[in-house]
Image (cartoon, helix red, strand yellow):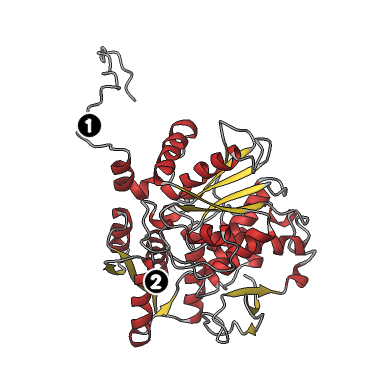
Amino acid sequence: MAKIAYLECTKCGEHISGEQPQTICPKDGGSLYVRYDLESLKGKFTRESLRGREATMWRYHEVLPGDKPVTLGEGFTPMLPSRDNPNVYIKDEGLNPTGSFKARGLCAAVTMARQYGQKKLAIPSAGNAASALAAYCAAAGIEAHIFMPKDVPTANLVECEAYGAHVTLVDGLISDCAKMVNARKEAEGWFEISTLKEPFRVEGKKTMGYEVAEQLNWELPDAIFYPTGGGVGLIGMWKAFEEMEYLGWIGSKRPKMVSVQAAGCAPVVKAWNEHKPVAEMCQNAHTAAAGLRVPKPYADYIILDILKKSSGTAIAVSDDQMFVALREWASTDGVFAAPEGAASLAAYKVLLAQKFLKPSDKVVLFNTGSGLKYIDVIADALKISAEQPKSHMAAPAARNIGGIIQPV
């Protein structure tokens, strides 16, 4: 794995040692980026050196932290061409361990937590990050303390309990969960591993950027649509593009980064439309897409800066639009997406109609998780039940089974 040169504050640029566990910049509370000695990797860590490596995110181990990964086989998820538009690709993160993109970030964070000798990790989560932390902590022999809204998808709660995590359900949003973690962590001896309040989840998520480049033969797309709750994936990919350009793997071209949020919780969209550098706390946040129910991302200032630098945009779609897109992806492309992921397709259609993009533009839409994690939510939204008449399904024809060939 790579040796960390230093940690860098994304606000003031302060350099901080990575020899001990760090959370945020002590000067101004800025999120920290991990920096490596990329100069020493030039000419040694090349695109060609990836040939024959394992198909996980650790194929890029030269730019990932930790001496020995706590791995469950995360990363290198499929890039699927859309059947509707040959220029659109679906990056399906639902095939990661624990069924979502959260596996990448929590894998890297738990890897470093074990290396630092930490024994107890705590996280506020809207659902999928909790499942991922619980799984990787189980694999690492570390205690996981999870705080989730009480209305999280059932799968997340079941997973966390099965992995042996300590779970607290909160009557509120992820922001309320974060307040509880912050209030108790010192007394309980927990290391908080919240979104962008530690430096390593970004490192795991940035591998999505490396994969997009590699899977598209080192030609970045014209646009990337990313469902944005905390925004770690979007931030991580932008960091990956910077690293790859420095290594000589790609040129200066960057995709338009599109932040996709839910109409009922769209703090980044509001800030973007009002030309503000940071977001306001979203009041009365509501959406069936649990991962998008984040009233204010901690690193909103980084997200908004990336949108500006990339000539991208931020867009909100309704829950109804998400579930129409969810059914379309499932029935057309065979991808059973999480509501958050389906929001990417809904947003793409809107921006195509608005002529922000052309049908000829090469676009990557991120599905951030498997719809199987949201069975109860999706069944309710699509009004599907076991008792529902199956009038549209033909009964199987009677057949003579006497002639079926049996194994010998």
Question: Left or right: 388 with respect to 99?
Answer: left
Question: Left or right: 155 with respect to 38?
Answer: left
Please, is residue 284 above or below residue 389 in the view? Answer: below
Q: Nearer the viewer, mark 1 or mark 2?
A: 1
Please, is residue 220 above or below residue 329 in the view? Answer: below
Residue 155 in view: yes
Residue 244 location in percent, x, y?
A: 72, 60
Q: Nearer the viewer, residue 300 or 391?
A: 300
Q: Nearer the viewer, residue 108 or 55?
A: 108
Q: Nearer the viewer, residue 356 or 183?
A: 356
For the point 73% across and 55% down, the residue is 47
Residue 185 location in percent, x, y?
A: 37, 82
Where is mark 1, residue-wise? 388
For the point 60% across and 33% down, the residue is 85
Q: Nearer the viewer, residue 145 or 115?
A: 145
Question: Left or right: 137 with respect to 89?
Answer: left
Based on the displayed image, in which of its 4 quarters is residue 283 positioned? Answer: bottom left
Where is mark 2, residue-wise? 123
For the point 71% across and 46% down, the residue is 217
Please, is residue 259 above or below residue 36 in the view? Answer: above
Specify the farthest residue to the front. Answer: 274
Residue 64 location in percent, x, y?
A: 61, 67
